[in-house]
Image: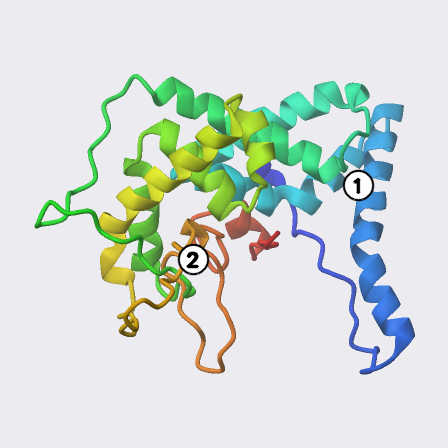
Amino acid sequence: MNPSAAGRAESPPDSRHGTRGNGAGAAAAAAAPNAGVAADADALRRHVAGDPEAFGELFRAHADRLWAVAFNLLSDAEEAADAVQEAMLSAHRRAADFRGEAAVGTWLHRIVTNAALDRLRRRAARPTVPLPSSPDGLPREPVDVRDAITDHDTRMDIQTALGMLPVTLRAPVVLVDVEGRPVAEVAQLLDIPVGTVKSRCARARAQLAVHLGHLAPERAPQPPGGNQPASPSVSDVGRRDAPDGSKGQAAGSGAGDNTNPTARRAGRLTRRRR
């Protein structure tokens, strides 16, 4: 299956008829995610039973998000599309083996993640360009990255910096900080201890801080003996609050980014934050 053939991702249910304080509207909003999970499970069952349209429905519901997962790991649009295609062919063939231990969407995301990680591992033998050191040779504090990406150049800065990390550091920091996966799940995916995931994420953030320090807003002076702010995660890199105070999209999310071949054909890219 070619991911470029995917149609427009399904929109969330329209809740405009709900009113503030309306119990029915709140219940409908709460039920929406469960409805999506049920629809995915139904589509997979129909596919296994021989419905030729069912798997296409399932793929279209997740295509943009699956591409974003692959792109965040690979930093290459065409290679991400290839990884998604490879993963969906695998899911199509192995659908009968699905045991229902996780949601169908989670299962698809794991297959895509593994396909992208396989590609990263094949790259491992290639030399990487080291991230620059700070001019004074001293460690630099991880950048404060709690602002939304507002322009293409910033997105490219972040993707370039991620691409310069060695595979062993990039995979965990992308999965934890950009994709928002639990550390324990990432440890399982990468087959490494939880402590190793945490330490590699910390090292990746420190390296990214050097390259992306120009994105950091100036910090307010800290009072003597005061609590220092915790090191932010990579999901916050390049994030700037909108004028109304709302938070923007995370780095590498793909929102508004036309580098996604699927999004170009579908007309929009959906990126659900976990």
Give residue 100's quadrant in the image.
top right
Check disc 2 and report the residue beneath it: 236
Is residue 158 placed above or below 18 in the rendered structure? above
Badge 1 local density, few (<14 within 10 Å), some, or many (20+)? Answer: many
Is residue 240 placed above or below 86 in the rendered structure? below
Q: Residue at x 56, y 54 (%)?
A: 269
Check disc 1 and report the residue beneath it: 40
Marks counted in the figure total 2
Please identify the residue farthest to the front as the structure is shown. 225
Q: Residue at x 55, y 33 (%)?
A: 186
Q: Nearer the viewer, residue 63 or 248?
A: 248
Q: Residue at x 91, y 72 (%)?
A: 24
Where does residue 149 sit, x and y in percent of width and height?
Answer: 40, 62
Where does residue 82 sit, x and y in percent of width and height?
Answer: 49, 29
Q: Nearer the viewer, residue 104 or 134?
A: 134
Q: Residue at x 20, y 47 (%)?
A: 139
Residue flagged by tag 1: what amino acid is it?
Asp
Element carrying mark 2: helix
Disc ID at residue 149: none
